[in-house]
Amino acid sequence: MRHFNIALIPGDGIGPEVVAEGVNVLKAIEELDSGLTFSFTAFPWGCEYYLEHGRMMEEDGIDKLRKFDAIYLGAVGYPGVPDHISLRELLLRIRKTFDQYVNLRPISLLDPSLTPLKDKTEKDIDMLVIRENSEGEYAGAGDRLFKGNPEEVVLQTGVFSRKGTDRIIRYAYEEARRSNRTLTSISKGNALNYSMVFWDEVFEEIGKEYPDVTTYSYLVDAASLYFVTDPERFEVVVTSNLFGDIVTDIGAGITGGLGLATGANIHPEKKYPSMFEPVHGSAPDIAGKGMANPIAAIWSVSQMLDFFGEEKWGQAVLDTIKEMIGETEYLTPDLEGNAATSEVGDQFVKKLSKKQK
Ligand SMILES: NC(=O)c1ccc[n+]([C@@H]2O[C@H](COP(=O)([O-])OP(=O)(O)OC[C@H]3O[C@@H](n4cnc5c(N)ncnc54)[C@H](O)[C@@H]3O)[C@@H](O)[C@H]2O)c1
């Protein structure tokens, strides 16, 4: 019997709405596979919790999470709590404490109708962005001096350690080698003369150990242009925390929007739990209306299953997502359909179950 213990942090806004559908998919898989079980423990952390308790998670929250195989998160952040508090005290805290230094964001076009780009098909947009997830520009290092004075100075320091840069770039080379794809590094060595010159050097140095991997290196401004004009250039991509955050939103824009964008926060050594979440936020504009697209959150379930070594199920979930996109009847309003979040979820489970029986 394979058993996985999953912590749920549905969070704020549409987070609980989409996580519920992802959990239904896992429960359906349990029914379909007699050798596989999951247990779920939900934690009520997020902005409402903050307004009541003055903190985003329980004091011993990190210790409570430590024993799980994975964390499944919806979204964090809501008007009424400053974003830098909600983000730093929950999401970034988990990523950092559990050393989830790899952020895996697949950018794959599931159907040509989803892209605003002319004449692009599934084979033109199919990449995996590997984003450094533990340091870089989001390290939280800096200072604010002489606050409110004319001499005010604000420093936000990008932190690029040898260990941190080395391990993410090596991870990307391994993935490119394993999947027999090209590897592109995105950086900005012309302007960021310390951090990104170092990044480029490490990319080149490690590359010597992978002569079989074809590599490219682009400045982030040029890469942003190519994401739109020539996405077919990219297969596996490795980049820093900030650049990865931005280019993957371009990636979401060319593949159907945030309702379809997923991201896994991985601690590859499995000493701590990894975390799976849709890329989108709490979407206060549509929260509570039953309009949120649950597909991004369901795609996170596929990533989680792959991470557990249940690739057969990860692929089955992804295949079902592709089928769902082909049927306009079960699309949410962001994809120009009329279906509610729960209708998409229910139909998904039906389809998956029918295929596997
Ligand atoms: N990982 C996270 O938890 C995360 C990520 C981004 C933003 N946030 C937080 O979420 C809050 C709102 O941020 P925002 O408005 O900039 O970004 P957002 O992702 O919540 O929403 C941006 C736009 O995309 C739409 N959208 C997002 N997800 C959707 C879905 N599943 N289905 C249909 N439409 C969807 C929204 O309706 C909105 O118009 C902020 O507090 C922000 O800090 C959290």
Image: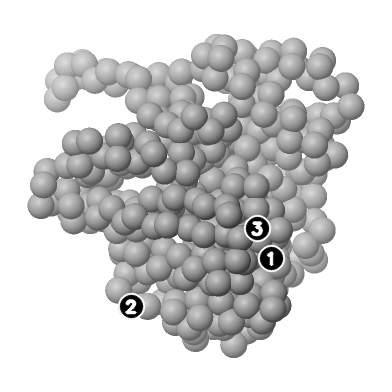
Label 1 CB, ligand 1: below 8 Å? no
- The residue lying at 48 percent from left, 83 percent from top is 343
Tell me which numbered mark, 2 or 1, is placed earlier along the sequence: 2
- The residue lying at 17 percent from left, 48 percent from top is 50
Locate residue 22 relative to residue 62 in the image: left or right: right
- Secondary structure of the residue carrying tag 1 is helix
Q: Which mark is residue 316?
A: 1
- Secondary structure of the residue carrying tag 3 is helix
Circle 1: residue type:
Ala
Residue position marked by numbered label 2 in the rendering: 289
- Residues 328 and 146: in front is 328
Height in image: 167 above or below 64?
above
Structural distance between the alpha carbons of marks 3 and 1: 6 Å
- Residues 62 and 330: in front is 62
Q: Are marks 3 and 1 in contact (CB under 8 Å)?
A: yes
Q: Quadrant of residue 289?
A: bottom left
Circle 3: residue type:
Gly
Q: Which mark is residue 314?
A: 3
- Residues 174 and 308: in front is 308
Locate residue 162 relative to residue 91 in the image: left or right: right
Locate residue 97 relative to residue 225 in the image: left or right: left
Residue 176 location (% of width, % of height): 78, 35
Circle 2: residue type:
Lys
